[in-house]
Amino acid sequence: MPVTEEDWQELSQDLPDAADPVITKYLQGRDALIAEEKKQRSDANFRKALSPIARKACAVVARIRDEEKRAIWNPSLEEALASTAGTTGACLHPGMMFTHAKGLMERTRLWRIVRRMPKGALLHAHCDAMVQFDYLFDVLLSTPGMHILSPDAHFADGEARRRGVVQFCFRERDHVDDCPSIWTPDYVPGTPLLLTKMADEFPEEGGEGGGGGGRKGFLAWLKTRVTISQTDSVEQHHGVDHIWRKFMNCFLCLGTIIHYEPIWRAFLQRLMADLHDDGVSWAEVRFTWALNYCRAGVEKPEPDHRHMVIAFQEEVAKFKAEHPGFWGARLIWTAIRRLDTRAIVEDMDHCITIKMEFPEAVAGYDLVGQEDLGRPLRDLLPELFWFRKQCAAEGVELPFFFHAGECLGDGDATDSNLFDAVLLGTRRIGHGFSLYKHPLLVDLVRDRRILVESCPISNEVLRLCGSILSHPLPALLARGVPCAVSNDDPAILGQDAAGMTHDFWQALQGWENLGLAGLGSLAENSVRWAAFEDQTADEWSRDIREASLGSGTKAQRLKQWGVEWEKFCLWIVDEYGEQYLDGDEE
Ligand SMILES: O=c1[nH]cnc2c1ncn2[C@@H]1O[C@H](CO)[C@@H](O)[C@H]1O
């Protein structure tokens, strides 16, 4: 029976109003409970120590975020915005899938702010996959002597061009006149043909990139071979193994572009310039060392990795000299985890040899490739123990920065890599996507001060989560685990910029609990857990513990970052304070 108007009048008298002491008391308890939980967050101390200006900046950013949530990420505005947002018909909402949100995100105020933020150190990224292809292809086509080849098939039709492996190399002499074109069925697999000529002769029909024939069509097609398309990235229903097949194929091509000295040097300059522009001061780049690098004007690959490292060090030194705000870069040596014991051990041996000659260039060691299909750390124990012993014998410091838990498993061999990574003394964990399922490990990782290098956009595009909203990083932050945000493979996965603004923006917009303060703490962590120099395990732990109160390089970098952070907060307040502050935010 519905309540009559008369009864309702009487009944509603009994409802306490919002200011009733019962409700006020309840709310006090509720606030206290929430505050108590927040004390466990890994950014709690950073938040507590914010300067008055930084507090104001955080309030401004929270308001801008709320405003944009209502005004931009709003399904009812869809018609007006869809055409310019490049949203391909997806419903606008806060936390929508990355590739759908990208175009619109880049035009928000929050973007302008995050872009300017001092982001500290880039701790997790794979070298081949970092610089925008529009730039890299320009360099590729304008480098004299570059040739294209396909190791095992012609590219005569659309299907062949979708599947075959594309590679590049330098050749002194142009082979093109006496050999059938790569675009015909008569092409002899493995024959290098002059790239500029082949690009101009790219056939009109059947190219996947939709750019037509000739050079423009060639570039559009080539881009499809080295990137995950928007369609790939939103087709979550095909699963992880499927997207990794496409992803791995990209690397087969890319390695052959940047492993030629003139391109390698140009690539490094552009990489550092992009990072610097994005407010990134330091980079630790994971690098997989195929032995196919050639010096300028030389066809025969170098027998070892020396020259590649020398060029790396020269380019970093040059960039640092021209940009005093940039602290530099180091490499993390990575081996493909699928390889057999002999290949892994040979590669470890190369790693130690290079480390002995160039200790500053190489910061540590890791294993890469799809974790589910590669060898778990447990299986690699003999190799890893041999490596550790060898390093000790040679007196080199090559700490582990293991990928672990970049998977959906719960208790399978891949997920259990997390146990081995911790037991083997990893100094940071790459991804740690499945870590939140392991309460004991979460506590260990927190207590041993192991940092999680989280790459939210990568995890989304490689189909571990549907969008930023279902990413597990907030669970780790809430439990006190130190984390930093990185971009992983930005040229392939869709960010299409070497910097970290897209990943930072998504975290800020996606997670209410983070705010600008939380984002600042993630950036500060990246500096605190950076491997600026070789350190023993004890020195490493001491510097992380002492942070800016210490006396070494790390403390100095943390202070420098702190100064940039304050300047940044002041800029936010100057720029937006008048519009977004009303004086009672302290
Ligand atoms: O997110 C990742 N997890 C594991 N391996 C990766 C990821 N991104 C790239 N690579 C691997 O690194 C090598 C290139 O340096 C490639 O083998 C690629 O598969």
Image: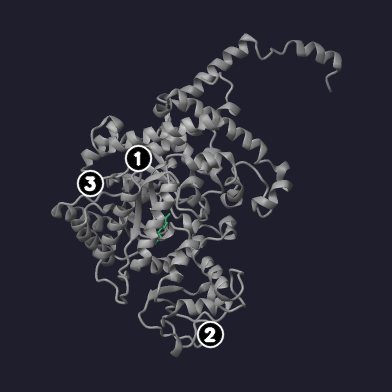
Residue that badge 1 annotates: 527
Residue 234 visible in this rendered orientation of the protein: yes
Measure how far apart labels 2 and 1 are at the Cα level.
Answer: 52 Å
Tag 2: amino acid: Thr
Residue closest to the eye, 193 or 336: 193
The percent coordinates of residue 505 (x first, y second) are 52, 42
The percent coordinates of residue 295 (x first, y second) are 30, 70
Measure how far apart labels 3 and 2 are at the Cα level.
Answer: 53 Å
Residue 413 visible in this rendered orientation of the protein: no
Residue that badge 2 annotates: 184
Q: Secondary structure at mark 2?
A: loop
Relative to 278, say whether 296 is above or below.
below
Q: Quadrant of residue 542?
A: top left
Tag 1: amino acid: Val
* CA neighbours of label 2 inside 10 A, class few (<14), some (14 to 19), many (20+): few
At a point 73% along the width and 42% down the height, the residue shown is 76
| Dot 1 or dot 3, earlier in sequence | 1
Q: Which mark is residue 534?
A: 3
Q: Quadrant of ligand 1?
A: bottom left
Q: Secondary structure at mark 3?
A: loop
* CA neighbours of label 3 inside 10 A, class few (<14), some (14 to 19), many (20+): some
